[in-house]
Amino acid sequence: MKRNSNKKKSYQNNFAKLSIFQNQKFKFKKKCPLTGKNAPIVDYKNIKLLRRYVTENGKILPSRITSVSQKKQRELSLSIKRARNLALI
């Protein structure tokens, strides 16, 4: 019985050491690269821009990886699909 209780305590100590469970003072969030000044216009004709947000297999990259805002992600996915339909990508 004592061995099991010692194991539980060691697991609890390990969880306390993890930084996930501690309060984060600084949270860094990247800004959307498609909004703001001098931002490129999202359009199905702008193939250079669209290729940045598509994998080699042709899948659209999620916004958590590319740090694109939700509004721009919707525009981006729509323009990628249009470019696929017109065989531009």
Image: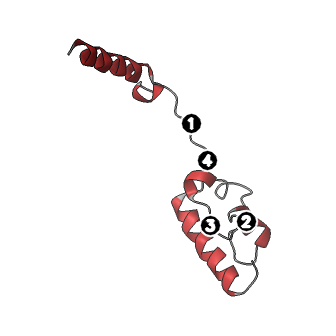
What amino acid type is highlighted by mark number 2?
Answer: Glu
Across and down, in percent, residue 28 comes to 56, 36
Q: Which residue is mark 1?
A: 28
Residue at mark 2 to residue at mark 4: CA–CA distance: 25 Å
Q: 14 left or right of 39?
A: left
Q: Could you tell me if the residues under marks 2 and 3 are in contact, i.e. CB atoms within 8 Å?
A: no
Is tag 2's residue or tag 4's residue first in the polypeptide sequence?
4
Q: Is residue 13 above or below residue 85?
A: above
Q: Which residue is mark 4?
A: 31
Q: Could you tell me if the residues under marks 2 and 1 are in contact, i.e. CB atoms within 8 Å?
A: no
Residue at mark 2 to residue at mark 3: CA–CA distance: 10 Å
Q: Which residue is mark 2?
A: 56
Residue at mark 3 to residue at mark 4: CA–CA distance: 19 Å
Q: Secondary structure at mark 3?
A: loop
Q: Secondary structure at mark 2?
A: loop
Q: Secondary structure at mark 1?
A: loop
Residue at mark 2 to residue at mark 1: CA–CA distance: 29 Å
User: Which of labels 2 and 1 is toward the front?
Assistant: 2
Q: Is residue 9 above or below residue 58?
A: above
Residue 60, label in figure: 3
Q: Residue at (57%, 64%) from the top-left corner?
A: 73
User: Which of labels 2 and 3 is toward the front?
Assistant: 2
Front one among 26 and 2? 2
Across and down, in percent, residue 37 comes to 70, 54
Is tag 3's residue or tag 1's residue first in the polypeptide sequence?
1
Quadrant (top left/top right/bottom left/bottom right) for the C terminus: bottom right
